[in-house]
């Protein structure tokens, strides 16, 4: 059993790894962060670190033997890397959760197979297949690469007048899926946790607004009916149980309204702590980072109760220059990731504001 004083291995050294390491330290754990990037923000706050490639078998084995359990802060961990680590130490979430979330075709097939609504989709591995898929799915539609897409990268919108050849070129002619465009009213997500023994806890549904394809603001509550909120949590639980999932996961969904009703359509899952769960740090009894540490260590989950109405705003690029004004603002929780250079589009920090009224 992992006990306080044990070492948690974290693959990936970005802000998510950094906040996991800080939560682990609070619970008396040591942390060892593995990242190929010598400027990793998580290195500032961990006990030990390794700078090596994710393909470096010798370094991976040394790392695995030096820790008691391994987790990761990003889903594109190569399958071979997870397998090498898994041969020497427990790893959570499991390899299946990684594989499913790395490939949009596998992901959509898996989620639809659970009876959960997703956008209509079709596999596209060539231009002719794209033309065929457009005949059944219709335009508007979104063409997305199966792998390595994030923050709107690796995807292109197809309108009725779009030339399929141009769309196919826009995704680099990489194996893709075509998805029907969902006319959503709002984007929402559930952040939840599951332990190896099947204990499950979800945070309140949150509403997410993006700017230039990057998450800008998260608001909780999401402003949906109680029935929709419950349905979202049920969806997250069904997915987590089906994956035998261990750790925190996020399920991103579209809220579709019309005919006076609300409908949820799942877009994707992230097998890790998630930007849309940052509000829990200061906005809920237990943060998603602490919850993740508890889950991967096999410890009881913490309470997910929300402390008020919460807004989380990402500080992207030069937004971070407002740090001193935010510090002077009563009740604002400022989190800076320690990144030296405020490049455009780079997540530099976030601020969480908790308002006393709950709804
Ligand atoms: P993703 O990389 O799948 O998270 O997509 C990035 C963003 O593109 C989402 O947050 C949505 O705003 C938009 N998007 C993706 N897929 C669809 C879809 N099928 N219908 C409508 N909008 C979408």
Image (tube, rainbow, N blue to C red):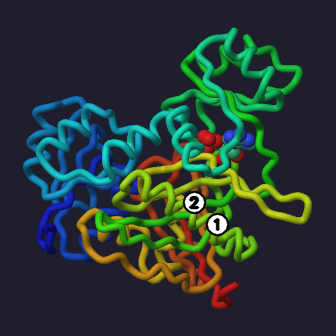
SS for callout 2: helix
**Residue for point 80% across, 14% down:** 163
**Residue for point 46% across, 68% down:** 335
Mark number for residue 240? none
Whether label 2 lies within 8 Å of ligand 1 gets the answer: no
Mark number for residue 231? 1
**Residue for point 82% across, 27% down:** 138
Residue 65, relative to residue 208: is it above or below?
A: above
Let me know if residue 344 appears in the view.
Answer: no
CB atoms of marks 2 and 1 within 8 Å? yes
Pinpoint residue 83: horizontal percent, then vertical percent: 22, 37
Q: Could you give the CA–CA distance between mark 2 and mark 1, rounded to whole angstroms?
A: 6 Å
What residue would you read off at disc 2?
A: 235
SS for callout 1: helix
Task: Say which of 79 and 32 sits in front.
Answer: 79
The image quadrant of residue 52 is: top left
Pinpoint residue 358: horizontal percent, then vertical percent: 66, 87
Q: Is residue 6 left or right of residue 224?
A: left
Whether label 1 lies within 8 Å of ligand 1 gets the answer: no
Residue 223, relative to residue 111: is it above or below?
A: below
Q: Residues within 10 Å of mark 2 (few under 14, many from 20)?
A: many
Quarter of the image with the C terminus is bottom right
Pinpoint residue 77: horizontal percent, then vertical percent: 34, 38
């Amino acid at each position: 059993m992992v006990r306080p004083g044990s070492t948690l291995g974290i693959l990936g050294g970005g802000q998510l790894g950094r906040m996991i390491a800080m939560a682990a330290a609070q619970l008396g754990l040591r942390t060892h962060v593995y990242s190929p990037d010598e400027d990793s923000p998580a290195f500032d706050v961990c006990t030990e670190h390794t700078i090596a490639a994710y393909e470096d078998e010798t370094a991976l084995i040394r790392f695995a033997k030096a820790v008691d359990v391994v987790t990761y802060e990003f889903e594109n961990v190569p399958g071979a890397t997870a397998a090498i680590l898994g041969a020497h130490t427990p790893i959570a979430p499991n390899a299946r959760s990684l594989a499913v979330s790395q490939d949009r075709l596998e992901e959509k097939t898996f989620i639809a197979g659970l009876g959960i609504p997703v956008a209509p989709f079709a596999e596209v591995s060539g231009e002719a297949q794209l033309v065929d898929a457009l005949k059944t799915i219709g335009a508007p539609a979104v063409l997305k690469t199966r792998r390595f897409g994030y923050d709107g990268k690796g995807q292109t919108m197809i309108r009725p007048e779009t030339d399929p050849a141009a769309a196919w070129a826009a995704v680099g002619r990489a194996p893709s899926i075509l998805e029907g465009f969902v006319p959503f009213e709002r984007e929402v997500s559930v952040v939840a946790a599951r332990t190896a023994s099947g204990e499950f806890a979800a945070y309140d549904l949150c509403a997410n607004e993006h700017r230039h394809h990057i998450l800008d603001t998260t608001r909780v509550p999401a402003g949906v009916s109680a029935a929709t909120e419950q349905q979202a949590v049920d969806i997250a639980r069904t997915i987590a149980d089906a994956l035998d999932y261990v750790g925190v996961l996020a399920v991103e969904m579209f809220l579709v309204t019309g005919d006076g009703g609300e409908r949820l359509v799942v877009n994707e899952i992230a097998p890790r702590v998630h930007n849309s769960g940052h509000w829990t740090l200061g906005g809920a009894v237990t943060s998603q980072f602490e919850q993740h540490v508890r889950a991967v260590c096999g410890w009881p989950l913490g309470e997910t109760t929300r402390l008020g109405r919460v807004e989380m705003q990402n500080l992207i690029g030069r937004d971070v220059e407002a740090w001193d004004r935010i510090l002077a603002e009563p009740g604002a929780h400022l989190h800076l990731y320690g990144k030296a250079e405020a490049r455009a589009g780079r997540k530099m920090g976030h601020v969480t504001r908790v308002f006393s009224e709950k709804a």
